[in-house]
Amino acid sequence: MDSACVSLLPSVCEALADPKLVPPDDTSLEKLLDWFNHLTSQADGQSLLQHQPCLLRFLYSVMESDAMDPTIFSFSLKLAGLLAAGEQDFCLLQEEDVLVRVFVPDGWHTPGLWSEASVRCGWIQGLRSMIQNPQAMDFFCRNGIITLVLQLQNDESLFIASLTNQILADILNSSMSPVLSSGTDGTAEGGSPVRPDWASVTTQVMRHMSRSLASEDQTVILPGLRLLTVALTRCSDPLKGTLWNHVQEHLETLANGKRDSLTQPIMAVLQAAARTPLLLQPERGVEALMNVMLCSRNTDDSVRCAVSVLQLEHCPEVLKNRATDIVLLPLLYITGTRQWLPETDETSGHHLLMDQLSHRASCVSLLSQSLSSIGELICKNSLSSASIGPVSSSVVSLLNMCIGHHPSTVLQVGTFPHLIGCCKVQRCGLEVLGSLTVYKESVGVMDEAFTILLRYLQSPDSHATVLKKTHQAALKWFSACSPSPDVWRIVSNDLFSVLKKHVCDGRWAVRDSTLEFIAQLTAALKGYREYAEALHAHGIISVLFTALSDVEAYVQASAVFALGEALTTAHLPLCASLQEEVVARLLTVLDHDAESFPRRAALKVFTSWLKIPQSLSVLDQSLSSVFSLGGNDCDWEVKVHTLELADVLLEKLLSRCPYAVCGYDPSQRCAEQTLTKLMNLGLLELLFKCLFDCDRPVAQKACAQLLKLRTFLSETSGTDTNDLALEIHRCSWGEEIVHRYRVKYSEQSDCVNNNEASQEQADVVECDRSCPKELGLFEILDLLDLDEMQQTLSLSSDHVINSPQSLMEDILFVAQQSEDNVVDCY
């Protein structure tokens, strides 16, 4: 702790303990706790209370007050627990009788505090911090605190109830581990005796959990299931086995009870158990219970259970196959793929499934759940190759149904009219259709896939979000498999005509996603001659030019990206005049567009062009304008993108200069030419200007590039060669350079005339007169001290604004204000 914080802390403690002063906001107190947490973690076993007795006085004052603010009281509870986590501070707090005052609510002086949720939360958090200390378990058991903790397990605040479950799991770990590791003589590992009161706490928690699960009241069962889930997740493996022995019978009763409202909580318990060695022990019955949950619920719950099973990392193959069948069931059933349906007899519950699918709400829920789960299976490559064909056909059939085209394979035409135009099912189906491209078996439905995708693009009723999903799916199909010439002719003619219409759609989201699709498709099919020719022949380029003037900034930016990709497409017959027109339009966007998104997009396009091995010649002629416009932009992200462009150019030019070999040094001449070109393009001026920019990311990137340039110069030409002289007086960054030059000159003069003040002043005046209008590049880089600047720029503003000193000063300032003048800046 630095001296400034040491001097401020007593005043802060006094201000917090005074109920007459304005308390700080919760955020400031949480930041102060974070700082104390950092201090205790760095204390190396030393007592913080001994070095800062004001903390002990603060806790005394809060506990003795009759009118303490609940927020401050909650803070003191958390602080006490944090301090008690250390051995020395725990002993000191116990000797001073502070722990009983803090953690036994019966002794609190301020009435009504326990009814405040923030106080109960602070109490449980402080307690949880304290019991990290093994000594704290004796205090915990001796004062009967477990009874109060168990009451909070049913707290009306879900956050407090969740915290309580976590602390109960910690208590079980702390109290039961020595019991489990004890020998027949009643001693734990290391020879320490097993405390009977620790075993008593364990017994109380176990009985509480068993009573909760055996209850008929759902409001009691649910907290018990949540506690069991947390305990199975956080406790040690031997303890998990003991817990399971206590609850296995109750869980079997609940699972067979078929209460729909308990399905997900029970599955959460089984998922937690399945991630432990319990799953591999048949006598524990974890897999059997999962089978019960899969087969004994209604279809909706069965699908949810199946999804939970498929999320397991190590799932038994039989269980996984059964869960996969259940997930596929709604999709296969509604599309009439009977031959792939698992067990189609009445006892399997398909008549119930038919009833659910006939109602819109349950049908949409079931299909969405099924399709989302299928998508996850595909992403994990968990779908068997034998089921790819049926799933692909079913998804295409479902998408046809949703758009009003009923395939002949459907059980009864018109049975599911509520699916027509259902955006949610359409989006899920399109996602699955796109993801199926990772399987070679899906090629069999390629023609049908392109047909249904075109149908969705051509439909005037397609929702904007559905069109976006269609674009994404189409992009995957075009990228994964090139259609046959016949299919391509049909697709290209219809595709580009509908895309041109969508670029003029009244909905900006449709225009934006269409332009985005054109850009992505052009990038994906750059080597495909037919696509390049069709892109040019169908007038897409002129459509992109028109979109540059769109009223929406997002649409303009997407048009910029699409035009940028189109200009670099292989096989595209673009003349020099068209290239010049594109560059000119992008420069106009960069110069005149009021919105920042198109300007950022233009810079990104210029950068992508420059990265191409054979970059556009017309771009080289415009780089100076790009650097000038981008460097003077009011948007800091535009400046960052300009510096990224400069970095690509710098890397290109510097990589061309050879190093000295066998006495021949061509690098010096090359370095001079490179520096001259950088200066003529305005890149050096851009870097120096951005180095002093008020936005840290801009200055940070400029500093990194100047360091790269300095390294290059030192490795090639050396510091003793003739250097490039830069005019600095006419530049905005020149004032800083001149100032640093004068300071350095005066420091040199001080070394010679340290004891003559008049001579020193004369030296400064002489420096002002003799300061050159031009300075060498090496000299400027030396004056800037780039290494120190880089270190400073790497620090965010948080290291000042959120420093402990600044935080405590803010707390003191707020405390001294009246209630009427307090403004919560957070």
Image (cartoon, rainbow, N blue to C red):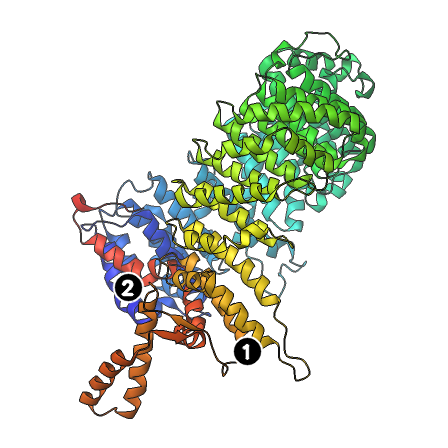
Which label was assigned to residue 427? none
Q: Nearest the camera: 291 or 154?
A: 291
Which label was assigned to residue 717? 1
- Image height of 326 relative to 798, above or below: above
- Figure quadrant of residue 445: top right
- Is 266 placed left or right of 69 in the picture? right
- Is 747 placed left or right of 168 in the picture? left
Distance between mark 1 and mark 2 Cα atoms: 56 Å
- Image height of 716 relative to 523, above or below: below
- Is 387 placed left or right of 95 in the picture? right
Q: Nearest the camera: 357 or 234?
A: 357
Where residue 455 sits: x, y (%)? Answer: 66, 19
Q: Secondary structure at mark 2?
A: helix
Kind of residue sitting beneath label 2:
Leu
Where residue 290 sits: x, y (%)? Answer: 71, 32
Q: Secondary structure at mark 1?
A: loop
- Image height of 794 relative to 396, above or below: below
Where residue 569 sits: x, y (%)? Answer: 65, 42
Q: Residue at x 76, y 22 (%)?
A: 393
Label 2: few (<14), some (14–19) or many (≥20) C-alpha neighbours in 10 Å: some
Q: Are marks 1 and 2 in contact (CB under 8 Å)?
A: no
Determine if residue 143 is in view.
no
Kind of residue sitting beneath label 1:
Ser
Q: Which residue is mark 2?
A: 9
Q: Nearer the viewer, mark 1 or mark 2?
A: 1
Q: Residue at x 27, y 53 (%)?
A: 62
Q: Residue at x 66, y 34 (%)?
A: 475
Counting residues from the N terminus, which is met first, the one under dot 1 or under dot 2? 2
State which quarter of the image contains the N terminus. Answer: bottom left
